[in-house]
């Protein structure tokens, strides 16, 4: 066990990229930070910083505490009382993988605190099981674009380096949409022709991303498996999915379970302002206020730093140079 503090920075993620339901993920340049230390003889305390974390429990029902406990159990070590501090710039319940980032951050931090008994693959298996699908956690854990498959027992993945021209525009509606609700909207059965359509689009999208064929993205980034059923939950989404590629996007998709809409954009495009206005104006026409952000694919997974016990620098002082204003 480490006698000191561990600090972990983890990227947000987008899942599905349109057709790759529960399979494709990409890490994004928005981050969550967790600091963790054992407090022998003390009580567990969970500190939440920044906006938007209201309502998150600060007792032992907190997700990051429960994940840390699993790491210690898995490693066969006694669970210490912990101080966990958390700051996140990833909006919650918007389809940007905030819970996956918290899971990955807690797994990596607790594992480091325990002296790194578990390997990266074990952490990936645990994260996939905790989330129920590997797409967001894989992206947060490995960075870049991650293609993964989980059979309910084991997850396998291949990481793809994002093309250097890929940029990301997200339009984040002001309302929350739970993954549970968005999964409930899905049908129990699909038409064979829709299933074939998705296999084709998803396979072509992976091949296009892996080979750098960005010109295939508008054709490949289309879906008939989940987006048509989720569209009624996000007013304006159908119109945006239909028109964004003619308004400057390479491809457009619901980010994860939504409600955020995510456009892939060629960094050198001169139509970025047009696309941004199109997304905001369309949502507004349907009565939805939204915030846009220009992001990049995050190339790396978690960054870990270990500090000796006795240092007096606070958590927020440690990360303040890095967080978005
Ligand atoms: N693949 C998942 C979904 C991501 O679309 O439901 C959200 O957790």
Image (cartoon, helix red, strand yellow):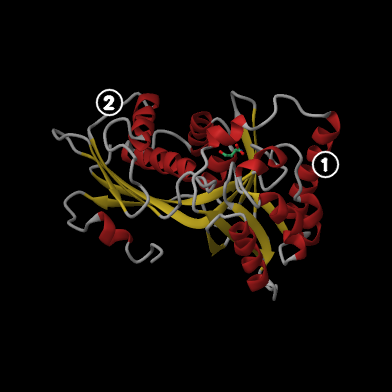
Q: Residues within 10 Å of mark 2 (few under 14, many from 20)?
A: few
Where disc 2 sits, the SS reads loop
| Identity of the residue drawn at 17% across and 56% down | 312
Q: Please tell me whether residue 26 is drawn above or below residue 272 in the rendered image.
A: above
Q: Quadrant of residue 56?
A: top left
**Quadrant where ligand 1 appears:** top right
Please give left or right for residue 121 compared with residue 282 in the image.
left
- In the rendered picture of this protein, how many numbered marks are placed on residues? 2
For marks 1 and 2, the one nearer the N-term is 2
Point out the residue furthest to the left here.
41
Q: Is residue 157 above or below residue 169?
A: above
Q: Which residue is tagged 1?
A: 200
The residue at which mark 2 appears reads as 78
Kindly identify the residue that appears in the image at 20 percent across and 49 percent down.
Answer: 309
Left or right: 153 as drawn, with respect to 304: right
Whether residue 297 can be seen here: no
């Amino acid at each position: 066990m480490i006698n000191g503090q561990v600090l972990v920075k983890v990227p947000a993620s987008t899942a599905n990229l349109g057709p790759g339901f529960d399979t494709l993920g990409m890490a994004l340049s928005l981050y969550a930070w967790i600091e963790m230390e054992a407090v022998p003889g003390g009580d567990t305390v969970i500190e939440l910083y920044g906006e938007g974390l209201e309502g998150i429990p600060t007792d032992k029902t907190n997700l990051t505490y429960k994940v840390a406990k699993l790491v210690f159990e898995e490693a066969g070590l006694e669970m210490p009382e912990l101080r966990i501090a958390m700051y996140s710039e990833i909006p919650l319940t918007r389809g940007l993988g905030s819970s996956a980032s918290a899971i990955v951050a807690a797994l990596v931090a607790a594992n480091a605190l325990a002296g790194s008994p578990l390997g990266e693959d074990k952490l990936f298996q645990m994260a996939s099981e905790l989330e129920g699908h590997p797409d967001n956690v894989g992206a947060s854990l490995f960075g870049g674009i991650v293609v993964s498959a989980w059979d309910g027992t084991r997850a396998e993945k291949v990481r793809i380096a994002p093309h250097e021209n890929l940029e990301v525009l997200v339009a984040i509606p002001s309302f929350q949409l739970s993954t549970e609700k968005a999964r409930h909207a899905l049908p129990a059965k699909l038409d064979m022709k829709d299933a074939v359509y998705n296999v084709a689009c998803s396979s072509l999208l992976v091949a296009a991303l892996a080979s750098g064929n960005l010109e295939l993205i508008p054709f490949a980034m289309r879906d008939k498996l989940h987006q048509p059923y989720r569209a009624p939950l996000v007013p304006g989404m159908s119109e945006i999915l239909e028109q964004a590629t003619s308004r400057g996007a390479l491809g457009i998709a619901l980010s994860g379970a939504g409600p955020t809409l995510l456009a892939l954009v060629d960094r050198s495009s001169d139509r970025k302002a047009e696309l941004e206005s199109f997304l905001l104006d369309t949502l507004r026409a349907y009565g939805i206020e939204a915030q846009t952000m220009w992001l990049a694919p995050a190339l790396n997974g978690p960054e870990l730093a270990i500090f000796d016990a006795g240092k007096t620098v606070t958590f927020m002082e440690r990360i303040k140079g890095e967080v978005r204003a």
